[in-house]
Amino acid sequence: MTDQAGPVLVTGAAGFIGHAVAHRLLDRGERVIGVDILNDYYDPALKAARLANLTAREGFAFHRLDIAEAEAIAALVGDHGVVRVVHLAAQAGVRYSIDNPFAYQRSNLAGHLAILEACRHAPGFVHLVYASSSSVYGDRPLEGHGFSETDAAVDPVSLYAATKRAGELMSQAYASLYGFPQTGLRFFTVYGPWGRPDMAYFSFTRRILAGEPIEVFGEGRMARDFTYVDDIVDGIVGALDHPPAAGGHRVLNIGDSHPVGLMDMIATLEHALGREAIKVMRPMQAGDVTATYADVSRLNALTGYRPRVMLAEGIERFVAWYRDYYRV
């Protein structure tokens, strides 16, 4: 696809997934407008490095904005003729929400509303793709099959999950009221180069290389549907290219569909690093869920989405990037 429909707005462009999506869109000849607040939730230098990669590329323009600033976002969309948006900006992190609840109110609720308002006033708007989360499913047993979009999402166990579910409901209301197409993507655990330092695989890598102990929460019994970032980008861009009909709003899972136990992930990381971790077993933390497992059949039927990078290969790629970036 070319940019005949105008530039694509990517919010959270200096973030892990937003950075990767923006590169993919640029690779195929799109013009991309990136928005990010560049806050200090985690290392601002890493965000700056991601952003430097993008600003060096032709076709990319950056605006430092808080997505909750509704008038500024609306002006940006209107002034540049934006009719497609990939909305990935949010306050991330389950544990962080315990001590910083109002950060989630602003970014995940007011910010999502500002994006919706900007889109509904944009002439000829084509498609809003936005980030939801697997956390909306709550804490439930795997029962041998993946979480399906038809499963109830009414028992969030963290404020983060509650705000993500609220965003889905807000989008459903706006689709019904104003008739512009939307797709919500329920992300499962994403990993890979340029990732987030607050994620377990990333922080474990730092600690293992430094000879420091790692804290294994849930006493190692947790499992996650680890999904390599390139596979995630395939799904996001595929969804963007297949908007629902006017007035349509859908929610789709996007993950790997192969949950991996936390201890197995640690063993894979140890092998890639060539070092054994010093493990300190801890109980489950408030807001965490025991396991995640994506049923991605709907996204596959729509776009042909099929994750290709297995965990061992993905972790090897991440470790190679980490050693190069941090010179360790």
Image: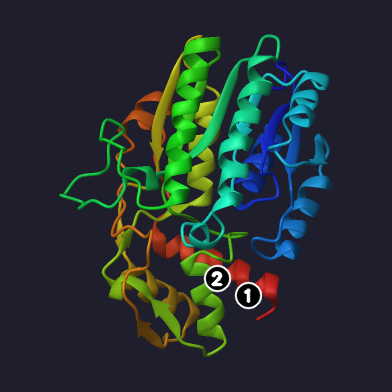
Amino acid type of the residue tagged 1 in the rendering: Arg
Is 156 drawn above or below residue 270 in the view shown?
Answer: above
Identify the image's colour scheme: rainbow, by chain, secondary structure or one colour: rainbow
Q: Quadrant of residue 90?
A: top right
Relative to 269, residue 98 above or below:
above
**Place of residue 101 in the rendered image (x, y in percent of width and height, measured from the top left):** 54, 53
Q: Is residue 205 left or right of residue 310?
A: right
What residue appears at the point 51 percent right and 22 percent down from the top-left corner?
Answer: 182
Where is residue 176? Give x, y as percent.
Answer: 47, 12
- Which quadrant holds the C terminus? bottom right
Please name whichever residue, 140 or 195, is drawn nearer the observer in this view of the structure.
140
Q: Could you tell me if residue 243 is visible in this image?
A: no
Front residue of this view, candidates 158 and 8: 158
Answer whether labels 2 and 1 touch (C-beta < 8 Å).
Answer: yes
* Quadrant holding the N terminus: top right
Q: Position of residue 193 (x, y in %)?
A: 59, 60
**Figure check: 158 above or below 154:** below
Q: What's the residue at 71%, 62% (across, down)?
A: 46
Residue assigned mark 2: 319
Q: Residues within 10 Å of mark 2 (few under 14, many from 20)?
A: some
The label number, if any, that marks residue 323 in the structure image: 1
